[in-house]
Image (cartoon, rainbow, N blue to C red):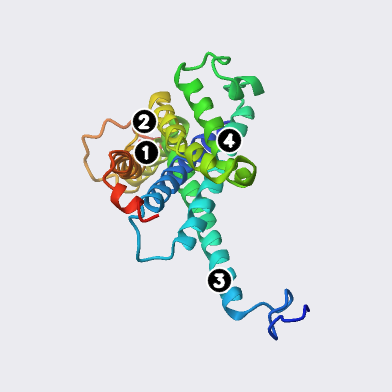
Amino acid sequence: MRAGDPVGMTSQNPHPAVEARRRRLHQIRVRIVAAAVGLFIAVFSVIYAQMPATANTTKTNTKTARTQSLAAAPSVQSADPTPMTTSQS
Amino acid sequence: MHGHFFWITTRAAGSVCLVAATVSLCIGLLMSGRMIRSRPPRDLRIVHEALSLTALVALAIHALSLLADSFFRPSLLDITVPFVSGYKEPWMSIGIVGGWALAILGLSYYARGLIGPGRWRRLHRWTAGAWALGLIHSVGEGTDNHRMWFLAMSGFVAVAALALLIQRFSGTSQGSLTVR
């Protein structure tokens, strides 16, 4: 501690106002990084969902689920051109 | 998924870079034009700096993840030197020039003692040009420019930045600049 330094203002124990400011700036940086990571994950997910292979898989899954629901209710007449499954025949 | 992982990563990182650089540019223009008086400018400077560094990290990820893409397979020269790759020119080269300019002009902040504050401030104004090159690259390259999410996200921030740029360079905020 140098002569003339106020009590409690050494580098080990900074002034509360300085410490509060440092904490606030750290929070700002953390929030910006968190927002950027969040945006990256969101954009990544949207692009991934829109990729042709993913979109085809999703379409196939939807079609399969629809076919299965039709198989579960064979009495319902439908104009859907989906081929009959073995369980329906 | 793993086949497209680096391709999706480079596109997502490019979008994050564009948004972070645009918001950072807006804050820089607001500070230099002294259009914000209610908040302490020192906090805004920290936000501006953090957003700029975030944009540069996203830019590095945008470029480096392209190197690992199994379909495109560019060399280091393809992604760092303009007019070498031949892929979707001139948009690719515009992006490379804009990326280098953004990195050099942004990081020059830490060398402003060497450059001189006045000279650095004049130099730093060209960051807006580097940002414009990045915007032209993202629209011209065309991978996501027809997607609604991209148009909404980048359009919203780009319109705000362009409005601030026009206001700044048309001299509307000159009166407040003299206060400085």
Front residue of A86/B22: it is B22
User: In the displayed structure, does residue B68 sit left or right of residue A43?
Assistant: right
Tell which tag, 3 or 1, sits nearer the viewer: 3
Q: Earlier in the sequence, mark 1 or mark 2?
A: 2
Q: Which mark is residue B145?
A: 2
Label 1: few (<14), some or many (≥20) within 10 Å? some
**Residue A48 seen in the current view:** no
Marks 4 and 2 sit apart, C-alpha to C-alpha, by: 27 Å
Name the quarter where the N terminus of chain B is drawn.
top right
Q: Which mark is residue B104?
A: 4
Mark 2 secondary-structure assignment? loop
Marks 3 and 4 sit apart, C-alpha to C-alpha, by: 29 Å
Residue under label 1? B150
Q: Badges 3 and 1: C-beta atoms under 8 Å apart?
A: no
Tell which tag, 2 or 3, sits nearer the viewer: 3
Q: In the picture, residue B40 is in which quadrant?
A: bottom left
